[in-house]
Amino acid sequence: MNSELTARCLHRALDVVHDLKAGPAAGLAALGRLVGCDVVACTSTEHTTRRLTGTVIDRPEQNLLRHPEFRAQAHQHPAFAAHRSGRLPLGRSAALSDLADLRTLRALPLYTDFYRPRGTADQLLCVVQADDRHGRILTLNRSRPGFSARDRELVDLLAPHVAQAFAREEHPPVRPVTGVALEVLTARERQVAAAVARAATDREVARHLGISPRTVQKHLQQIYRKLDLSSRAELMVRLTRGAGNP
């Protein structure tokens, strides 16, 4: 199979891999610039019930999961049926316009109420993680229809690296310290703790994880309780020492 990727494309793809190591949000933004898209997101799904459970997006103001109506209509998205039928397998990208014709899309409230008003004419979709119940899907929105073979090849090439970036976020490299094992924290609490260790504010953590600042505060309260701490400063000291810093 002939590749559409030039040496320059591959060098830029390597830059995206480096950005993903810094964090999913930075990597998604770099991927969007490389492919040429308006908004890039990676959304967690419960594909057995067709529910969206969270998202990381390069433009937080475009996060549609903030709208209850969007969540309620998300089951209409053709990607769910395409994944079940094998038309959207793990690690292989497909355009929204591949999965449904324009007439079908125009009949979906999801498309007419949310995508079209925001100028989204097409999406490139790629399932980057999946098990029997949960999944994570990469979406790249574009204001014009169609994606080239180069676009698809780039996304397929980088999909495993996107999955690895999220896996690192779910299990951050923070070590147990002073006899207290951080395994007592849930995966989400470890994500919040890792962000706090990088001196992120509640608002920055919320934007990065696709949750509200109030939810971040609730997670922090649980973290303090489980680790017998009383403040954010104590948590930062605990985690940075645990990571091997002086």
Image: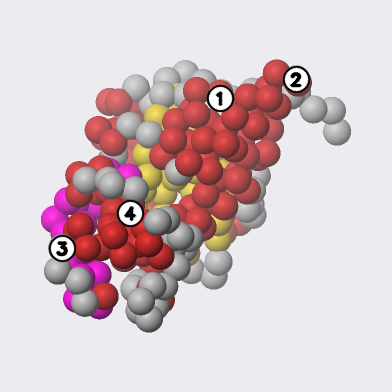
Q: Nearer the viewer, mark 2 or mark 4?
A: 4
Against 206, residue 46 (above or below) is: below
Q: Which mark is residue 236?
A: none
The spot of residue 57 in percent (x, y) is 37, 39
Relative height, residue 131 to residue 114 (above, below): below
Q: Describe the element under mark 4 as helix, strand or loop.
A: helix
What residue is pinned by disc 1?
35
| Alpha carbon distance from label 4 to label 1 | 32 Å
Q: Dot 2: few (<14), some (14–19), or many (≥20) neighbours within 10 Å?
A: few
- Residues 182 and 178: in front is 178
Q: Main secondary structure of the magenta part?
A: helix
Q: Quadrant of the C terminus?
A: bottom left
Residue under pointer 4: 197
Spatial CA span between label 2 and label 1? 13 Å
Q: Earlier in the sequence, mark 4 or mark 3?
A: 4
Secondary structure found at label 2: loop
Q: Tell me the quarter of the picture where residue 52 sits.
A: bottom left
Question: CA separation, marks 2 and 3?
Answer: 51 Å
Residue 154 position, x and y percent, is 65, 32
- The span from disc 4 to disc 3 (Cα, nearest Å) is 13 Å
- Residue carrying label 3: 231
| Label 4 CA crowd tier, 10 Å (few <14, some 14–19, many 20+) | many
Span shown in magenta: 207-226
Label 1, secondary structure: give it.
helix
**Between residues 26 and 156, which one lies in front from this camera angle?**
26
Mark sitting earlier along the chain (2/4): 2
Amino acid identity at mark 2: Thr
Residues at badges 1 and 3 in contact (C-beta under 8 Å)?
no
The residue pinned by badge 2 equals: 6
